[in-house]
Image (cartoon, helix red, strand yellow):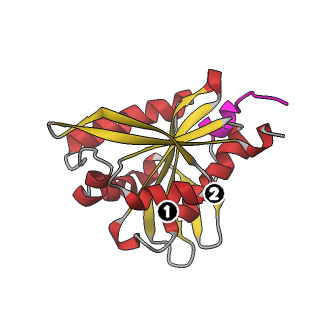
């Protein structure tokens, strides 16, 4: 069994799809879509992350993630509805550690698409890509205890809670707890 990560599957991510969705690798042409969700206060507040609502904040985020995509530390997709081509959100595997074959899954879905199953559907496809194409051994998620919707998504994908970190995250002048969920690549368990 090989535990080698496919760097090309990260750096040259392919378009993937589900029954209702198409996930297009993030590129300069899709930049405006990315910030539709990342500049939404409610979307970002649920993740306890700052709203990226200025050009400076967006440029800084874009530069960081562009570097991560180019060096194999992250892979990202913009999610669109197959029928309407409407933008739904952003899916990411970040903090990829090639030496230990692990990465963190994250998603930000536009409010108008909450509670329609899009987050779980897109995340399930990205998790499949993480295991089958990239060959990650472990995928984890860090989630606020208050973000019950996100917890339902990862639990529905088979991730199990393995930690409750106290005061590990600092946001808007306060410390917050985070829950860590993870799953091991099923093909590595055989």
Q: Residues within 10 Å of mark 1 (few under 14, many from 20)?
A: many
Q: Quadrant of the C terminus?
A: top right
Residue 4: percent from the left, percent from the top? 74, 27
Examine the rendered structure and indicate whether residue 70 appears above or below residue 151. Answer: above
Closer to the chain start, of discs 2 and 1, is 1
| Secondary structure type for disc 2 | helix
Instruction: Please tell me which residue is depicted at 33% across the width and 58% down the height of the picture.
Output: 37
Q: Residue furthest top?
A: 99
Alpha-carbon span between mark 2 and mark 1: 10 Å
Examine the rendered structure and indicate whether residue 91 appears above or below residue 109. Answer: above
Instruction: Tell how many labels.
Output: 2
Q: Which residue is mark 1?
A: 119
Q: Disc 2 vs disc 1: Cβ atoms closer than 8 Å? A: no
Instruction: Please tell me which residue is depicted at 81% across the width and 29% down the height of the picture.
Output: 2
- 22 or 182, which lies in front? 182
In this rendering, position of residue 68 left or right of residue 39: right
Q: Residue furthest bottom?
A: 83
| Secondary structure type for disc 1 | helix
4 within the magenta span: yes
Occupied quadrant, residue 40: bottom left
The span picked out in magenta is: 1-12
Residue 106: percent from the left, percent from the top? 47, 47
Q: Quadrant of the N terminus?
A: top right
Residue 177: percent from the left, percent from the top? 32, 40
Residue 60: percent from the left, percent from the top? 29, 35
In this rendering, position of residue 146 left or right of residue 124: left
Occupied quadrant, residue 174: top left
Instruction: Please tell me which residue is depicted at 67% across the width and 48% down the height of the picture.
Output: 129
**Residue 157 got which mark?**
none
Instruction: Please tell me which residue is depicted at 42% across the width and 42% down the height of the picture.
Output: 179
Q: Which residue is mark 2?
A: 125
128 within the magenta span: no
């Amino acid at each position: 069994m090989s535990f080698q990560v496919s760097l090309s599957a990260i750096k040259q991510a392919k378009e993937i799809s589900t029954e209702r969705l198409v996930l297009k690798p993030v590129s300069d042409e899709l930049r405006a879509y990315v910030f539709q969700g990342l500049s939404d206060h409610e979307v970002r507040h649920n993740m306890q992350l700052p709203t990226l609502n200025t050009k400076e904040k967006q440029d800084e985020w874009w530069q960081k993630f562009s570097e991560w995509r180019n060096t194999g530390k992250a892979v990202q997709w913009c999610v669109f509805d197959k029928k309407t081509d409407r933008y739904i959100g952003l899916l990411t595997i970040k903090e990829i550690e090639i030496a230990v074959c692990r990465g963190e899954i994250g998603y930000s879905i536009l409010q108008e698409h909450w509670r329609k199953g899009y987050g779980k559907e897109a995340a399930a496809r990205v998790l499949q890509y993480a295991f089958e194409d990239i060959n990650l051994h472990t995928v984890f998620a860090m989630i606020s205890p208050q973000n019950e919707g996100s917890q339902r998504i990862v639990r529905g994908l088979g991730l199990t809670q393995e930690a409750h970190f106290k005061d590990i995250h600092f946001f808007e002048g306060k410390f917050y707890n985070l829950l860590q969920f993870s799953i091991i690549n099923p093909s590595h368990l055989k």
